[in-house]
Structure formats: C-alpha cells, structure tokens
Image (cartoon, rainbow, N blue to C red):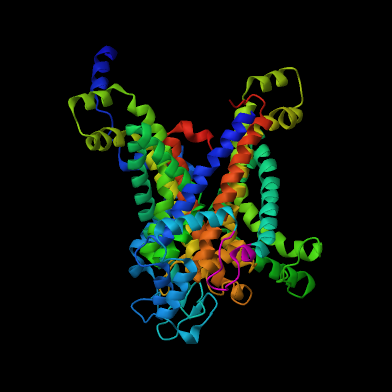
Amino acid sequence: MYTYIIKRMLMLFPTLFGAAVVVFLLLRLIPGDVCMLKFGGEGGYADPEQIAQCQELLRLNDPKIKQFYDYISGFVTFDLGKSMWTQQDVTHEIAIRFPLSLQIAIMATLVSVLIAVPLGVISAAKQNTLIDYFVRAISIAGIAMPSFWLGIVIILGLLIATQAWTGVPWMPPIFYKPIWVDPAHNLSQLIWPALATGYRYSSVATRMTRSAMLDVLREDYVRTARAKGLIERVIVNKHALKNAMLPVVTVIGIEFAFLMGGLVVTEQVFNLNGVGKLFVESVTQADYTLTQSLVMLVVFIYVVINFLVDLMYAWLDPRIRYS
Amino acid sequence: MATSELPNEEFVLPKQKTIWDTILRMLRRQPLGSAGALVILIMGFAGLFAEQIAPFDPEMENFEYMLSPPGTVHEETGKVFYFGTDSFGRDQLSRMIYGARTALLVGFTASFFGAFLGLVLGVASAYFGGTVDLVLQRVCDVFMAFPLIIMALAIVSIFGTGVEMVIIAITIPFIPNCARVVRSSALALKELPYIDAARSVGYSHVRIIMRHMVPNVMAPFLIMLTAFVGQAILTEASLSYLGMGVQEPTAAWGLMLQGGAEEYAESAPWVPIWPGVAITLAVFGFNLFGDAVRDVLDPKLRSQV
C-alpha cells in the first residue's frame, strides 16, 4: 500500500512538469513574444521602452533554456514573479483571493452531494417510474444549463421574490467578509454562487449515483437480503448505498478539481473577487505572469485531487488492494 | 388450396421501408433522442435560413427602441419585436436566430476537428504501441489536466478572440479526450488477424490506420462527436459571455448575455432570459440526441454515466 502511494505520488510530477512545459511553450515560443502582443496591437505603434521593460520583467532576453529553468524553479520556490498589470507579487494576488474561491468550491460540492445522492438513490430505487423520469430530466437540464445563466436567473428570482414578500428588492451583499468574521453576511453572499455551480455539478453525480445503484441493486447479495425478508429501505440505505458510492466519489472528486473552471464564469456573474475572476482579468489584460501561474494552480489542484480520489478508492472498497 | 397459397406468400417481396417507417421506429425506440433531434433540426433550420426567417437585421441598432418589451411594434415597418430588444435596440429574436448559426458553426466545427484528430491520434497510439503509445498517452494526461474553459481561455489569450480562434480554443482540449476513448477500442482491434494480414501484405502504416482501423472505431468516434457538440456550444457561450469569445456585433447567445445582462435583470428581464433558454435548449437537444446515439451504437457504455 505505502509503496503504491509513493509510486503514485511520484507519478504526479511528470504530469505537472508536462503541464508546465505546455504553458511555457504556449506563452513563450509562439511567434512574436508576449510583450509585443501586449503593447504592440495590430500594426500599431509600440513603445520600445515599454516592451524592453516587459521583456526585462519576463526575462525574455535570456536563452530559452535559462528561461525555462527560471520558470520551473519559480514554481518550486513559490516565487511566481510579479503581475504585469498591478506589479504585485503573483503569490500575493492569488493568496488574497483564494479563500473566497475555496469556500465556494467546498460549498458547491456540498450542494452537489446533497442534491445528487438522495436524487440518484430515489431514482434508482424507483426505476422507470414518473419520479425516475423527473429526476433524470432535472439532471440532464443541469448539464445543459450554463451556470452563468443560472446565476443571472437566481439573481432575478431573488429580486422578484424579495420585492413581492417584503416590498424591498434585496441583492446579495457585494463585499466579501470571511466566514469567521461575519458568518451571516458571508453565507448570504456565497450561498447563491454555490447553488448555481453546485446544481450544475450535481447532474453528473446524480446520473452516476443512479447507474451505480442500479448495478449494485442487481447483485446477488442484495437478492439474498431481499430473500431473507429485509425491508427495502434498509437494503437500499445500508446494503447497497455504501457500495454504490465508489464511482460517485470519483465523479465528485474530479468535479471538485474542475470546479475552478466553473468558478471562472460564476464569479463573473456574482461579481465576486475570487481566483476565477482574477483569471479572466489576467487573460483580458494579457497579464501573462499571472495567467501562467493561475493555469498551473488549477492543474496542480486537479492532479492532487485525482491522487486523493485514487487513495480513497481503497479506503471505501476494501476489495481493492494496490500492488 | 391452402398449400398452393403458401409458396406465393413466401415470394412476396418485403415491403420497401420508407423514410417514414425509419422515423416512426426511431420515435418509438428513442423518444428522448427524437426530441433532441427535433431541437437540433429546428436549430439547424434557423441557422441555415436565418436571413429568411429573422424579422429584423440582427445588427441593426434602433436607439428609439432601446430595451423595448416583447410585443413592441416597430412603427416604420410595422414589424413586431416578439422577444423585445436589447440595450442597443436590436431585435432579440433576430439575434437569437442568427446566434443559432454561430452556435452550430462553432459546435460542429470544433467537435468534428477535435473528434477527428483524436480519432487518428488514438488509433495511431494503439497501433504503434510501445514508446509512441506511452508518450502520446502522457501528453494526453497533461492536456486532460486542464479544465476545458481554462484551456480555452489560455488559448484565446494567446491567439486572440473571434469565431475562428474560439473554434481552435475548443478543438484542442477535445483531442486528447477523444484519443483516449478511441485508443481503448482500437487496442482490441489491433489484435485481430485481419490487421496482421494487412501488415503481412505490406501495406503502409498510414493505409492500415486510415483504411483498416479507423472505420472500425466509428462507434466511439460518433459517440464522442455528438457528446462534444453540446459541450462546445456551452463553452462558446461561456467564452463569449466572458468577452473572450465571439465579438460584437456578431450575434451569439453568450454574447447577448454579456455586458449588463445582470443589470437589466429587473428592468428588462427579457434581455437575459431568452438567450439562456436558447443555450439550454440547444445543449439539452444535443445531449439527448447524443445519449440516443450512444444507446444505439454501444449499449455497453450505457451504464457509464
């Protein structure tokens, strides 16, 4: 088991290294360097001084190998350079926004689990009934609905509902306060983006729970449980659910990793100053130092979570033994 | 008498299947898939004949009709703004109809190229095996570690915005996904005797891959292709919404939601509502249709998601 963990951990590095290479190639080796792109415009006048300054900042005049070495060692030492736009440390820019995004990601995952597991189980237990069709329709709609539009609809719904009930339209607060400072304020701001993102991510998990439950409910030991006269609820909740959770955990884990992608759009709708919004800004402002660090951050989260999901497999299903 | 009639019956040719029989059969077997196909057909029709259907020019600005509610009549022409107008006084319905064209163009092109390149890479990876396979798969690993929208945004940040760039940005992340799935089917195929036979005759690698292997992995290819279209439409909408996709004044659904759709949520709810409904319906349609395609082509895959 431990050898497996270590081996699997070592496997993380080639992927991360590969991703770093891809980002490096994308940003450095394309024709015309990034500074020309940023300040040059289309055939327009480019201030040579500005470009020189930018090239200096990105150390674009160094040999490519040296650049690559600096770039990689930057990741290892967490010295990610300065943002080309704000001149602040990239690490600082990310650090001040990360708690907000992480909180939404965790809340959205919770929302997604709370929707997906009960719905998936009911849907499987009542296969091919009206309830089943209804649940499936909800989950397919969740995949089809863009989360930013759902966000807009939620805001619209809030405005209309509060207007109708209290006479005064209410909007979620704009300024972020950490949950340990003002929990009510914090939750009333972040619950909506978490709902919008969580619903979307629950769709795949609902479908997964349903199909995993259907598979497990057809197994011999479930038939035995039925034969000895256990009530259906106990069979579903105690016997089947635990074994059906394996693929569901995978899906939820992978989605948590991809949540960062989902947040890019949701934070924009709710105007939240998180990592996702920072990413969009960095792309819009051609802030390459920031863009490359954020891309690597997302990839890092994804790779690490995948690793943790793999480990959880063995914990959830003792039949799986790694060698 | 009865005995002499029997042979006659046997020689009656089976009734020629008309296209209607096929459609009816599909409706019975795959009602949801048919509903999806219907949505796609309507969308395709709207996209193809946008000039004929759309009541207004989608890029025509009428400042005296800014944010008019649905049902407002354009006085000069007597035409009705059925879905209202946006903040430039442009007809929402017309922009939605033209938006279908953009969505389909991006959706189909990105999915086709993404799935096709993935198909070739996946089959080649399985066929050559060994180091080639290992390297290609590790490269796929790397690309698959980027969430779709992040990868697309990173690509757009380098190559710029606009329809063509959006297509490229969505195509690239699709390639490794399709390659991975196709490879697993092609691995089994590679062991079949006819591939050995083809090799022993001395056919080139390209010929074996393209003529002998690719046609036999069409099922996973088509499944991935149909699954991609919905995702591509959604990603295009997200990119355009963020202002990093299709640019004004081109009509695109995501773009219609960008720039103040939230602002008008209360005063002019038709501005944010309709484009979102269009995106949702389109992706819904493609997903239902994709599910049906998967059920028909590969029942084994049904239990996975």
Residue A137 sits inside the magenta stretch: no
Considering the whole magenta stretch, tell me its main secondary structure.
loop
Q: Nearer the viewer, residue A144 or B216?
A: B216
| Residue B230 locus on image (x, y percent) | 46, 52
**Residue at the spot x=29%, y=36% of the render?**
B215
Residue B273 appears in view: yes
Where residue A150 sits, quadrant-wise, is: bottom right
Nearest to the observer: residue A98 or residue B244: A98
Q: In this view, does A112 lie above or below A279?
A: above
Q: Residue at x 65, y 32 (%)?
A: A244
Please give the range of residues in magenta: A79-94
Total tally of numbered discs in the picture: 0
- The answer to whether residue B169 shows anywhere in this view is no
Towards the viewer: B210 or B80: B210
Residue A27, how many percent across, how many down? 43, 61
Left/right placement of residue B288 relative to residue A5 reads left
Q: Residue at x 63, y 52 (%)?
A: A199
Q: Quadrant of the N terminus of chain B?
A: top left
Residue A11 at x, y percent in the picture = 53, 39
Residue A243 lies, in percent from the top left, at 67, 30
Position of the C terminus of chain B, as image quadrant, is top right
